[in-house]
Amino acid sequence: MVIMKCPACGAESKLSFVGDSYQGPRRCWKCRGLFTIRIEGNEMKSCEPLSEEEFAKQQEIEALKNKLKNR
Ligand SMILES: [Zn+2]
């Protein structure tokens, strides 16, 4: 599990994911800011602001990926 610190408001949120790396969209629960985060080896490597449009696109990709995984 990794603690994500929002670069905009500083709110921390716990992330859990499979394995020790993750890349995908996240929304801050506090300021509703959108970010693309990249985690490697249980460490946050990058956190970039994301537009509403890009977020929707990335969420679609994530949903597709999950569908494929669950088959
Ligand atoms: Zn925030």
Image (cartoon, rainbow, N blue to C red):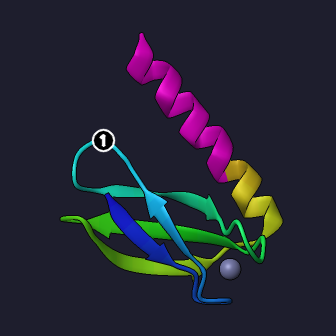
> For residue 19, which quarter of the picture?
top left
Q: Is residue 21 magenta?
A: no
Question: Seen in the image, is 2 located left or right of residue 31?
Answer: left
In front of the other: 36 or 19: 19
Image quadrant holding the N terminus, namely: bottom left
Query: Please, what is the three-letter code of the amino acid marked with disc 1?
Result: Val
**Residue 13: % across, % down:** 52, 67
Q: Is residue 38 left or right of residue 40?
A: right
Q: Please identify the quadrant where the C terminus is shown.
A: top left
Residue sitting farthest toward the left: 41
Please count the marks in the image: 1
* Prevailing SS of the magenta stretch: helix
Residue 28 quadrant: bottom right
Asked whether, in this view, residue 3 is left or right of residue 54, the answer is left
Q: Residue 42's spot in the image, x, y percent?
A: 24, 65
Mark 1 closeness class: few <14, some 14–19, many ≥20 residues within 10 Å? few
| Residue 61 placement (x, y as % from top left) | 59, 41
61 versus 54 height, above or below: above
Quarter of the render that holds ligand 1: bottom right
x and y, in percent, of residue 31 in the image: 77, 77
Q: Is residue 14 left or right of residue 22?
A: right
Q: Report helix, strand or loop for mark 1.
A: loop
Residue drawn 66% across and 89% down?
Answer: 8
Is residue 69 part of the magenta span, yes or no? yes
**Range of magenta residues:** 58-71
Residue where numbered disc 1 is placed: 18
- Indicate the quadrant where residue 29 lies: bottom right
Identified at 59% across, 88% down, the residue is: 10
Vertical position of residue 15 compared to residue 4: above or below: above
Residue that sits furthest to the top in the current view: 71
Q: Nearer the viewer, residue 35 or 31?
A: 31
